[in-house]
Image (spheres, rainbow, N blue to C red):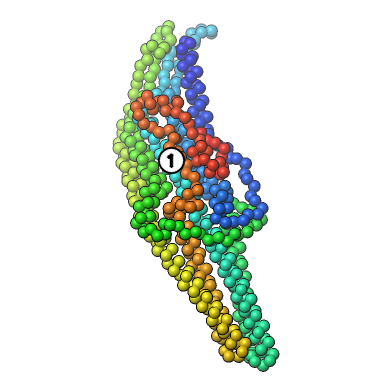
Amino acid sequence: MKSLRKFLSTLLSLSLVFASLGAGAASAASEEAAPEHVTINPDSLRDLLLKRNLSIRLELDNLYTAKANVNAASAGLLPSLTLGVGVTNPITFALKTISFLVPFLLPSNWLNLREKQGQLKAEGLGYYAVKLNNLASVDSVYYTVVGDLEAQAVLNRQAKVLEDIYQLVSAKYKLGLATQADIAQANNSRKTSRALARQSDAAVANELEAIKLYLALEPSTTIDVEVKHEDPSDSESKTAQEIADLTVKTSPEYRQLTLLHDAAVAHMRSVEYSFFNAFTMGSTGGAGSSASFSNLTTGIGLNLSFTTIANVQLSEIAKEQILDQQKSVAAGQKYSVGTTLVGLSAALDQYQDYLDAESSAQALYDVLIVKYKAGLTDLLHVFSATQNITTAAASRIQAGINVDTQRVALKRILRSDDFAKIDQCDLSRAGEVHGNLFKHMGSIFSSPKISIDQACAAMAKANLPASAN
């Protein structure tokens, strides 16, 4: 009986350990208060995004859920013990039956663990991809704000120029050198310009509100924008094929589908073995005797039905669907590489063309305003020149936004520069299943457990829960 009590104590301790592992979905840490003021640039945006973006936090929750599923699958391999007690008199009792389930002998349970481990690693890559995509999105919004601030300055400058022209026309009108139509035209132009400037103010304000949404900031938070532009990269000189060869099969989206395919294979094999539904060992005491471990018997539960065959077929279809999705992702990424390089090249050419056009329009205006003051040209030519300056400047600014956002897209594809600073979750130690049965059992009872915080380094700590083992 002493050895039996020791065995029961060990089994109870192991059960409590795995119960605590399964309950390891960590409690949320206290929320960091939103700052009252922020200055945004690409570096500060990255830091704020990783700490405060809600979609990243939600994806981190999914990662904790996947880790809990691995814990549950590991715990499902542990034996469970059932004892039947027979009371023979008020002060003595004997074990009449001993029966314990040994699920680690069922292949389907190991395959279920392998499936959950694959899903965990896939979820880790999903968490990484969400961070990359959100950084690309918020960077694109930032560069749009920068462009609109430049457009705002152009429109304000135009409004000042048209106000000066109105004052000039008014002075000439008093001298009888301008007509009433000239006054009306100058007044209409300056009012229209002021309205466009106010419209630009509203556009910038709306974009800053979008950044507050990305960063989960309060409506009262004030934002200053530090104007920067995206630096060029050496990869801009590479061909689309060279970049695709470097990036497609190493992308988190492609690797995630590889892991999901492996998990689907494990699921299909688990279904194939599901007709082994139980493996038990037990002992029953006879008349006047108790059950003991010296006369254990074993039993195997089998349950083969037509639904098993159908479920295997469904699993095979799901596995093939993942392979098709992976091909689709690869094709889409190759297309993105090509269009990004073409778009970047076109935007760079357009930027230079519009810059030259803006300079020429400004030079023409400088000549015409002097001629108008001297009475050598009419007001229509002056207004036409101011409009040409504004049109060329607006087109140059839009081309600049396109250059910045296409460079962001290219660096997202390459996972370079700021995107290289996004940590990945190293879930390679999440408990691999390999080797023989005894090595399997050793991995359950003795392998080191890693937490999500350890696997995802500082990024998970900056986001949400304390730890989940």
Q: Which residue appears at 42% of the width and 65% of the height?
A: 345
> Could one spot residue 145 in this view of the protein?
no
Q: Which residue appears at 55% of the width and 85% of the height?
A: 381
Q: Quadrant of residue 176?
A: bottom right
Q: Nearer the viewer, residue 142 or 199?
A: 142
> Could one spot residue 23 in this view of the protein?
yes
Q: Which residue appears at 48% of the width and 52% of the height?
A: 417
Q: Residues within 10 Å of mark 1 (few under 14, many from 20)?
A: many
| Residue type, label 1 | Lys
> Which residue position is annotated with label 1?
121
Q: Quadrant of residue 193?
A: bottom right
Residue farthest toward the right in the current orientation of the protein: 174
Residue 207: give x, y in percent of width and height.
57, 61
Element carrying mark 1? helix
Q: Nearer the viewer, residue 239 or 76?
A: 239
Position of residue 275 in the picture relative to residue 194 (left or right):
left
Position of residue 320 in the picture relative to residue 349 (left or right):
left
Q: Which residue appears at 53% of the width and 8% of the height?
A: 90
